[in-house]
Image: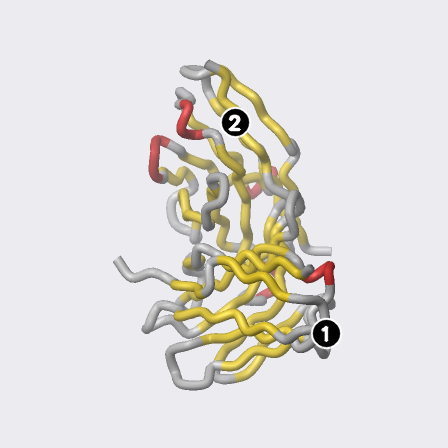
């Protein structure tokens, strides 16, 4: 069964450093998402991506964040200068167009020290 | 604001007894609705989905949910809880206000007592 894969599973970085979280969505899916879950809190929407551009983003997704689909398979989330409060589990998801369900990756746990 | 509300942050039941996890949505549209489960240190797994077909939806592991438009609810049930059901459960809506993004409820932590 096809699945969304995320790498790395865990990343530790120093405050102020840039990180890139990687995702490989399911190949015939058209919408891609990043969500995050700070420990003990709800899952928060960051950004959705469709047709090679951002279709929607939340207030959390400020200028420090960017997304790319560089090669037609990978979907990356970059945080330019990490802050302590960026520590969270980051989930990538993809979905076909329409009312269908999203498939989530296993997540990347980002720890900023 | 369009939203999803899970009425209980924590539910505790005994093994073998019924489970009820409540979810209400707020929307001018009829969204697609999903329940996802998250086991400790794991990703999000789809339990079941409602996408405007049958209002009673059956999912994996004996779970089911009923979409009630008049009550704007999509409660998750299971007749008999198993220890392996202990996890965090998220009610999720898609298509609120026509957007493709998923809107998550706050989550309900289900604890199963032996």
- Mark 1, secondary structure of its residue: loop
Q: Quick check: B79 left or right of B69?
A: left
Q: Position of residue B7 (x, y in %)?
A: 65, 34
- Asked whether B89 or B66 is in front, the reply is B89
* Label 2 environment density (alpha carbons within 10 Å; few <14, some 14–19, many ≥20): some
Q: Which mark is residue B20?
A: 2
**Nearest to the observer: residue A82 or residue A36:** A82
Asked whether A69 or B81 is in front, the reply is A69
Residue behind mark 1: A62
Q: Residue B19 vs residue B103: left or right?
A: left
Against A17, is A51 above or below? below
Give the total of numbered labels: 2
Residue depicted at 41% across the width and 58% down the height: A103
Q: From the viewer's perspective, is B60 left or right of B33?
A: left
Residue B95 appearing in the image: no
Quick check: A73 above or below B25? below
Occupied quadrant, residue A3: bottom left
* Residue pictured at 62% horizontal, 58% vertical: A111
The residue drawn where x is 29% and y is 61% is A2
State the residue lying farthest toward the left: A1
Above or below residue B75? Residue A14 is below
How crowded is the residue under tag 1: few (<14 C-alpha within 10 Å), some, or many (20+)? few
Q: Is residue B8 visible?
A: yes
């Amino acid at each position: 069964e096809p699945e969304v894969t995320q790498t790395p599973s865990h990343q530790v970085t120093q405050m102020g450093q840039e990180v890139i979280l990687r995702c490989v969505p399911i190949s015939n899916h058209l919408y891609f998402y990043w969500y995050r879950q700070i420990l003990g809190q709800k899952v928060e929407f960051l950004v959705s991506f469709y047709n090679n551009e951002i279709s929607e983003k939340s207030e959390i997704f400020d200028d420090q964040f960017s997304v790319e689909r560089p090669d037609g398979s990978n979907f990356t989330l970059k945080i330019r200068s990490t802050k302590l409060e960026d520590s969270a589990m980051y989930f990538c998801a993809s979905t076909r167009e329409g009312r269908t369900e999203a498939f989530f990756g296993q997540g990347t746990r980002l720890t900023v020290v | 604001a369009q939203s999803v509300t899970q009425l209980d942050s924590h539910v505790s039941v005994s093994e073998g007894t019924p489970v009820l996890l409540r979810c209400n949505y707020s929307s001018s549209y009829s969204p697609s609705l999903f329940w996802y489960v998250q086991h400790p240190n794991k990703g999000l797994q789809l339990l079941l989905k409602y996408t405007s077909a049958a209002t009673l939806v059956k999912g994996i592991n004996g779970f089911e949910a009923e979409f009630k438009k008049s009550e704007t609810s999509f409660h998750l049930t299971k007749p008999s809880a198993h220890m392996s059901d202990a996890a965090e459960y998220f009610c999720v809506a898609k298509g609120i206000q026509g957007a493709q993004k998923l809107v998550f409820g706050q989550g309900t932590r289900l604890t199963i007592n032996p």
